[in-house]
Amino acid sequence: MATIPEFDPTIQTLTPEWYQHKVDGVDMLRLDIIHPVVSGNKWYKLKHNIAYAQENKYDTILSFGGAYSNHLVATAAAAKQYNIKSIGIVKGTYAAGKLTSTLHDCINYGMLLEFVSHEDYAKKSTPAYLEKLCIKYNNPLIIPEGGANEWGREGSGEITHYIHDEYTHLCVSVGTGTTLIGLRNTLPNHVIVQGYAPMKGGVYLQHEIEKHVIPTLRKSCMLFDNWHFGGFGKWNDDLIEFMNSFYKTHDIPLDIVYTSKMMSGVRDQILSGFFPEDAKILCIHSGGLQGNVTVKEKLDY
Ligand SMILES: *Cc1c(COP(=O)(O)O)cnc(C)c1O
């Protein structure tokens, strides 16, 4: 059986025409290529959770996500690969005939789905609710939404392994902030780590940074939420055009939820002179391409 990851990530250099020589260089770390489903940052966040489940003889893992969640489908696929049963607690109720393609994939990987109201979903990290789930599902290993736990941060830190020390800036998309925190805590202090939130008001993630980033490294960590394009999961024709043109220039498919918004922000910042001229920027392609099915008619890839 194939392993996860199937391929090593690679670093791809973006063309100077794209950043108009305003900085010294822009590269992209292609985490999207490591596996067709457990792609991008998701594998790194899951790997130590899976290892823990195996070592401690858990036969089931349980996690949380929305109907388009990259994390949920990655969890389902990884669990199947390692012969662990999986349960997904899904935000919102979807009738059997109205499942999203992400949820269909989860089911096809053997994940048992439980649909809960937004109200119940909001309780997803309270001890009483977790206790109820433990009893109902016979003590599964519970992984928080987005893989946002200590093992998630530790695994994300291992992405640093692929990053040379020539870079001055690292750009990464943020959801729970787990990937950014793991990277920030393992990269040298001189690298400025910039997080791009794809939702409105995403700078609330500053709280997570304060909680988990080593205090001496916090100053070299920045968050931006200007490039939300209307909110989480929302998009407009400009974003689609940006994705198609980026693909045409670089042969890199971006995803509609996270990496397209980040790269749009990075490009605006480069062109407006936000970065110093000698900046060597590394952007993380954190995957998420499965979510593009919702806009596939509009994309040239
Ligand atoms: C899940 C996801 C993120 C967010 O990662 P966090 O560690 O939760 O911040 C970013 N990009 C893509 C493509 C994702 O699927």
Image: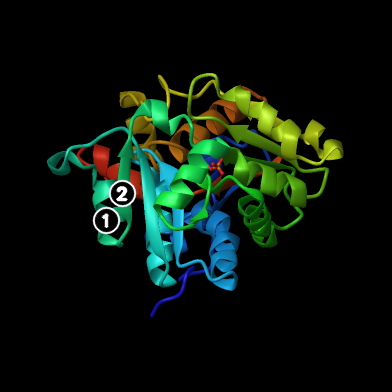
**What residue appears at the point 42 percent right and 22 percent down from the top-left corner?**
231
The residue identified by callout 1 is 107
Say which label, 1 or 2, has the lower sequence index: 1
Where is residue 196 drawn, in percent x and y? 57, 32
**What residue appears at the point 26 percent right and 56 percent down from the top-left corner?**
107
Task: Name above or below for residue 279 compared with residue 142.
Answer: above
Q: Please tell me which residue lies in front, 145 or 295.
A: 145
Give the amino acid at mark 1: Ile
Task: Name above or below for residue 295 compared with residue 110.
Answer: above
Q: Nearer the viewer, mark 1 or mark 2?
A: 2
Q: Please tell me which residue lies in front, 83 or 4.
A: 83
Q: Is residue 144 left or right of residue 121?
A: right
Which class describes the residues within 10 Å of circle 1: few (<14), some (14-19), or many (20+)? Answer: some
Q: Please tell me which residue lies in front, 272 or 181.
A: 181
Where is residue 34 drawn, in percent x and y? 47, 63
Instruction: Report if residue 244 is visible in the image.
Output: yes
Q: Quadrant of residue 79?
A: bottom left
The residue identified by callout 2 is 113
Mark 2 Cβ and ligand 1 under 8 Å apart = no
Where is residue 213 drawn, in percent x and y? 76, 40
Give the amino acid at mark 2: Leu
Q: Quadrant of residue 218?
A: top right
Q: Residue furthest front?
A: 135
Find numbered disc 2 in the image and state the secondary structure of the residue it sits on.
Answer: strand
Find numbered disc 1 in the image and state the secondary structure of the residue it sits on.
Answer: helix
Q: Residue furthest right?
A: 216
Instruction: Report if residue 249 is visible in the image.
Output: no
Mark 1 Cβ and ligand 1 under 8 Å apart = no
Where is residue 189 drawn, in percent x and y? 83, 44
